[in-house]
Amino acid sequence: MERVQPQGGIPLIKPYTKPSVARSLRQVADTLLPLLALFYLAHKALSVSLLLALALDFVAALFLVRLFILQHDAGHGSFFPKKWMNDLLGFFAGVLTLVPYHHWQLSHARHHATSGNLDKRGVGDIYTMTLEEYLKATPGERLRYRLYRNPFVMFFLGPIYVFMLSYRLPLGYGSEKPSVRNSVALTNLFLVLLWTGIYLGFGLKTLLLVYLPIQYFAGMVGIFLFYVQHQFEDAYWEHDPRWEHLKAAMEGSTYLKLPRVLQWLTGNIGFLELADVLGNFCFHHIHHLAPKIRNYLLPEVQEKVDLVKVAPTVTLKDAFRIAFADMHLHDEKRRKLVGFKEAHRLLREGSAAHEGV
């Protein structure tokens, strides 16, 4: 991919960075109301069919993912014009999404500042080893990394660990800050109140078979989408001082192009198209270039600003291929992701050469 120059491109994006309070409030309404309605319908469906209830849980989970996107925009200060409005929405959305707002906000800002930087990995990202690091690692380190990158662990166990366990503790980046610890503690307090309310108002069965599956499905979808945004074969990785923000955004993040049938199905519901539901997940390259652009203006930027059209395009089919492909190690020489199969072939060849000496 050719080097992208920002001259003349960034000013074209500035008009899209002013938030509309009315449109933002409308997004809150058309996210929360369907989410609550689907929760209630799933609760009622338990008396009819568990499968029907779980199907409704999954649809509700998509709206919970959308709520996280609103929380995400608030964390960037782009959803409302006032900081207190963003923080208020971000905190209470975080109670529903299980993501403590200030804790996540800090690590996510670090992710934006370091995405694709080989010298600053490990905060707010899907950790990626280089091929050379993997070859030099001990057998135990290689095993741990392989387990971490295993699709079953990543997408099926990951939601439980990340949202149910990890986010319940003030650990990791910024954990020494009182604001982070307070954010986690206050979120957990409100969660206890929420769980108690669901138990008393709807019963234990609804808590276990409606609330928890919604959270689990949303976590799966969220991790899946975040993974395919940066883990494609030719994703941009570079060391300091050669790392560049513009290249990291345009060459290290994807444009998720959805099939028309999905857009049609969701558009006909009367709310919004799936691209709007997924917002920053679909147009992640634009979001990394300019985080202040609200999710609902990203499709317009993609259509009208030529600068952003150089980003890698990924279809839904490509996304599933990326998620389950053997692409886990960045080969710095070939500047692409390679798999464990190739790494272990090199290990065997190296061992054979050593024995032959």
Image: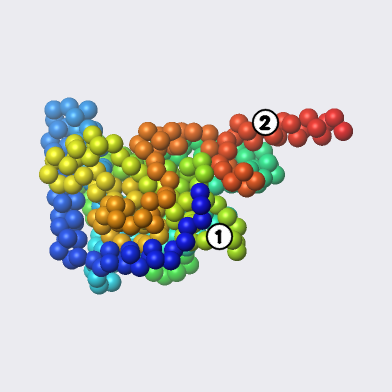
Answer few, some or many: residues within 10 Å of disc 2's Cα (few below 14, many 20 plus, some between 14 and 19).
few
Q: What amino acid does circle 2 point to?
A: Arg
> Which residue is tagged 1?
243
Q: What amino acid does circle 1 point to?
A: Trp
Regarding mark 2 in the picture, which secondary structure is present there? helix
Alpha carbon separation for disc pair 1 and 2: 30 Å
Tell me where residue 259 appears, x and y as whole percent: 28, 36
Residue 29, image quadrant: bottom left
> Which residue is tagged 2?
345
Q: Which of disc 2 and disc 1 is earlier in sequence? A: 1
Q: Nearer the viewer, residue 313 or 143?
A: 313
Residue 291, image quadrant: bottom left
Tell me where residue 344 appears, x and y as whole percent: 66, 33
Residue 332 in view (yes/no): yes
Rendered residue at 26%/46% (across/down): 275
Q: Is residue 326 left or right of residue 112?
A: right
Rendered residue at 24%/43% (across/down): 274
